[in-house]
Image (cartoon, helix red, strand yellow):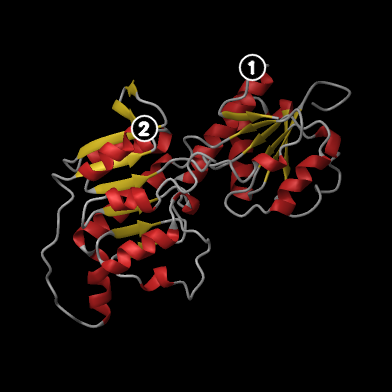
Amino acid sequence: MSAGGPARLTVTLAHADLLEAVGHRLAGQGDQAAVRLVPWDMRGPLPGGTDPAEVDVVVVPNYFVTPDGLRRLRDLPNLRVIQLPSAGYEHAVAYVPAGVTLCNGRGVHDAGTAELAVALTLASQRGVDDAVRAMAQGRWAPVHRSSLADRRVMVLGAGSIGGAIARRLEAFEVDVVLVGRKARDEAIGHVHGRDELATLVPTVDVVIVIVPLSPETAGLVDVEFLARMRDGALLVNVARGKIVDTAALLAEVRSGRLRAALDVTDPEPLPADHPLWRAPGVIITPHVGGFTDATTPRLVGLVLRQIGHLLAGREPVNVVLRA
């Protein structure tokens, strides 16, 4: 909070549309006097006239923040909360100063990422990628494909986005198998534990990966995991590239035994000469799960909830780390 005079929360926001929307909503709520909004994209120092000691909350930019940008958080001596726009937070952990709370963007990307997960699944099942290539050649080439209906689909990751994917899949008449870190029962249904994967993987036609990246999940989809998948099965990754062993996956798709639809890769960005680009049965999108116009309104809502909690002296929402 600012020193001297009425306590005021100083919040930095990177994007003009976010700044405008949050400011408009605060004015409508009568809270504009209690909050100072500062435009800052973290690519350089704070704008002139902003004392680093006054900054309470930093809302990290969408998508493109760099390690250099994150290191600038250490120059804010009274920083209280770092708000990420992403559900994933592994990239920020090493840069959180002592005494600062890190919050993720749980809920912000649910709709966009869930849509893309279903779109990639449908595109691969119905051969949309092959049809688009045939269009460029003027080829009319009907192919008998496997439906999504009546398939058994594993959603590996039962968090907020995993739940959103599962809810959308139900409309496609599929048998959804939810897998989380531990077995439990949720409103959406039973969640199997990861310790059941060896038994469950051979029973499904599609695996959609949406677990957070952590030491536990890095390389989770490895040679053994892929070997357990059914012949002709589809792997969809909308989580993080490092969760999947790229070399092992490449071997499987090159053999024609498995297919893959990937919004994330390892390495990322995927180099132009990487063999995954030309591997049979593979669809690749460039990490655009949450890169839609549905994201900003949801991020605005999250930032406003965060501000409301802090002004009221309550705990922040979406806490993932207290350094």
- Residue wearing tag 2: 195
Q: Residues within 10 Å of mark 1 (few under 14, many from 20)?
A: few
Closer to the camera, 32 or 38? 38
Q: Quadrant of the N terminus?
A: top right
Q: Classify 239 as above or below 251.
A: above
Mark 1 or 2, which is nearer the eye?
A: 2
Q: Quadrant of the C terminus?
A: top right
Q: Is residue 199 left or right of residue 103?
A: left
Q: Position of residue 241 (x, y in %)?
A: 47, 54
Secondary structure category for the residue under label 2: helix
Q: Which mark is residue 126?
A: none
Q: Position of residue 154 (x, y in %)?
A: 28, 41
Closer to the camera, 155 or 160? 155
Q: Does label 1 or label 2 sit earlier along the sequence? A: 2
Q: Is residue 28 left or right of residue 139?
A: right
**Whether residue 270 can be seen here:** yes
Q: Position of residue 191 (x, y in %)?
A: 32, 28
Residue type at tag 1? Arg
Q: Is residue 58 left or right of residue 223?
A: right
In this rendering, the count of numbered labels is 2
Closer to the camera, 258 or 225? 225
Q: Position of residue 312 (x, y in %)?
A: 66, 17
Closer to the camera, 250 or 136? 250
Q: Classify 97 as above or below 140.
A: above
**Residue sitting farthest toward the front:** 224
**Whether residue 165 can be seen here:** no
Q: Classify 66 as above or below 306.
A: below
Residue type at tag 2? Asp
Secondary structure category for the residue under label 1: loop
Q: Which mark is residue 314?
A: 1
Q: Which image quarter: residue 127?
A: bottom left
